[in-house]
Amino acid sequence: VTPAWAQLGYLAAAVCFIVALKGLSSPKTARRGNLIGAAGALLACVIVFLVSDLNHLLPILAAIAAGMAIGVLGAYRVQMTQMPQLVALFNGVGGGAAAIVAIIELTDLGPGSAPVFDLIATAFTIVVGSVSFAGSVVTFLKLQELMTTRPVVFRGYPIVYGLGLLAAVGLSVGLVLAPSMLFALLLAAIGAALGVLLVLPVGGADVPIVISLLNAFTGLTVAASGYLLDNILLLVAGTLVGSAGTLLTRLMASAMGRSLINILFGALKGGSTLGATTVSDRPVKSAGPADVAILLAYAQRVIIVPGYGLAVAQAQHTLRQLVDLLIERGVQVDYAIHPVAGRMPGHMNVLLAEAQVPYEQLKEMDEIDPEFKQADVALVVGANDVVNPAAETTPGAPIYGMPILHANQARQVVFMKRSMRPGFAGIENELLYEPTTMLLFGDAKDSMGKLLAELKALTV
Amino acid sequence: MNTEPIIWLTIFVLAIFVGVEVISKVSSTLHTPLMSGANAIHGVILIGAILVAGTAQSTPILVLGLVAVILASINMVGGFVVTDRMLIMFSRPRRALEKQSRRELDQ
């Protein structure tokens, strides 16, 4: 039996987690909130060592040190552009750990004597933990572009998926009736297969939503393993993440104007194969840096639509210099931040904050979108899908229904693009062929440098 | 093991409501750090991993338990650190802003 002081310690840790989540939902308290969460986690770990009669202390401490080293190294090494996939990996290993814990617990439960609820919780943790692990690995592969970012579906997918679900339910019942390691391992394998199948049909632009969903899944497995291990803290912490994560998933989906069902299974209805895999050779108007510099220099109102391409090219610092110069000339300049610019909601804010762009120049979509009508130039840098009119005009496009920035309403649109390659969602952008659109081809950093030089020449 | 599943169910249901309630007013700017922070919190599965590894009776189980400990500590420690890295960037422009407004006050 856990002594009272340890129970109180666990309660304190649980309160820390609640305060942490609360803090993370407001910009002023976010950092403190995260640190409070970390303190709660540390407290819980200290308690578990003090209170439990543990063997193998040395190997356990070594394993923690190894995990810490990997985690810290990963967290510090990662480029901010690659952060979504890192979060996916961290989430996946958490799910994997929960599944392993449940499998080991099964060997302790022993045959015949185990209570039904414990066995149900075991089966749940093994399946969902494996789903989370395997699903996260696939999201990582998609975001890292190690595999195609387009939805992957194959003939008979719904049947395979249905059979997989049936197998998972059947094996779970089997595990509850006749607990055995064989069933447990089969369940883990089926769970992993279901995880892969769950993420495959999701298009690249929607993958972050799935990370959030898998995050909630892992939370629930942690809650279930808390029940298994008789540990209330795990139950509370896991449930908090499970419910907050589910709500967050819905909030993210609605920021993109999508329903979760549509994101997960939309590709199955067909239609999302719409959009070009090949680049069409219709004529576009391309311009040189000098033309664009003149356009910008004599504008009154410029709105910049930054995208992931900007961050990948590391051009945000040059862009900031350009904007500073324009503001000096009296041009009114703002950044229009689409909620899903970058790879996931809020990602672009993180990326531009890294480049020290003043906070007040970053305008959220609802605020800035009506102003495109008055803008002389909309400068789209490394963004594509978030200004693609197909989201409104082409039912069946993978991004259909996503709110977009109406850059097309500006008097002149300038795209800075590396090539005519379509955006992350894999569909062509009609805006590129509009008569008011100019294209400045080249690597964003390179073009931005040239543009800055031209602008300086004009200013002198 | 658990004589009172109903109590556990009660805690579970109440925690669901708390989880929904605390983040119901988050702005989309903070979606990414919030997801990452919540991700770090479920790293407390480390406690479970430590418990099963520490009570392992055989070598294969111990090895498996240690794997779980490594995975869980990656989740927990890495999660909190990367969230902090993101949030530092959020607070930096604000500090610069405060400095600027203080300068304006001085003038």
Image (tube, helix red, strand yellow):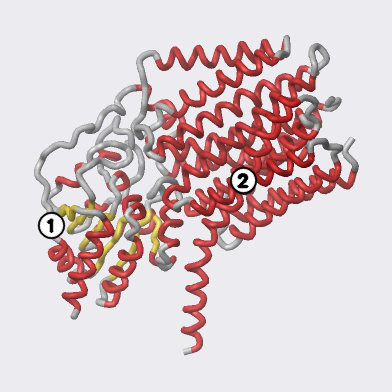
Element at badge 1?
loop
Question: What distance separates the C-alpha of mark 2 from that of mark 1?
Answer: 47 Å
Label 2: few (<14), some or many (≥20) within 10 Å?
many
Q: Residue at x 58, y 26 (%)?
A: A130
Q: Is residue A195 above or below residue A18?
A: above
Question: Do marks 2 and 1 share a chain?
Answer: no
In the rendered image, is residue A360 in sight? no
Give residue A295's position: percent from left, percent from top: 16, 66
- Judging depth in this view, the residue of A4 and B62 nearest the camera is B62
Dot label at residue B32: none
Is B67 situated left or right of A413 in this image?
right
Q: Residue at x 35, y 44 (%)?
A: A403
Q: Residue at x 26, y 29 (%)?
A: A274
Q: Which residue is denoted by mark 2 in the rendering?
A: B40
Is A349 situated left or right of A134 in this image?
left
- Judging depth in this view, the residue of A300 and A117 nearest the camera is A117
Q: Are marks 2 and 1 in contact (CB under 8 Å)?
A: no
Q: Is residue A180 above or below residue A28?
A: above
In the rendered image, is residue A221 in sight? yes
- Kind of residue sitting beneath label 2: Ala
Q: Is residue A409 above or below residue A353?
A: above
Label 2 is found on which chain of the structure?
B
User: Quarter-wise, where is residue A297 in the image?
Assistant: bottom left
Dot label at residue A287: 1
Task: Point out the image quarter for the C terminus of chain A.
Answer: bottom left
Element at badge 2?
helix
- Kind of residue sitting beneath label 1: Ala
Give residue A410's position: percent from left, percent from top: 22, 57
- Judging depth in this view, the residue of A14 and A339 nearest the camera is A14
Give residue A228's position: percent from left, percent from top: 76, 28
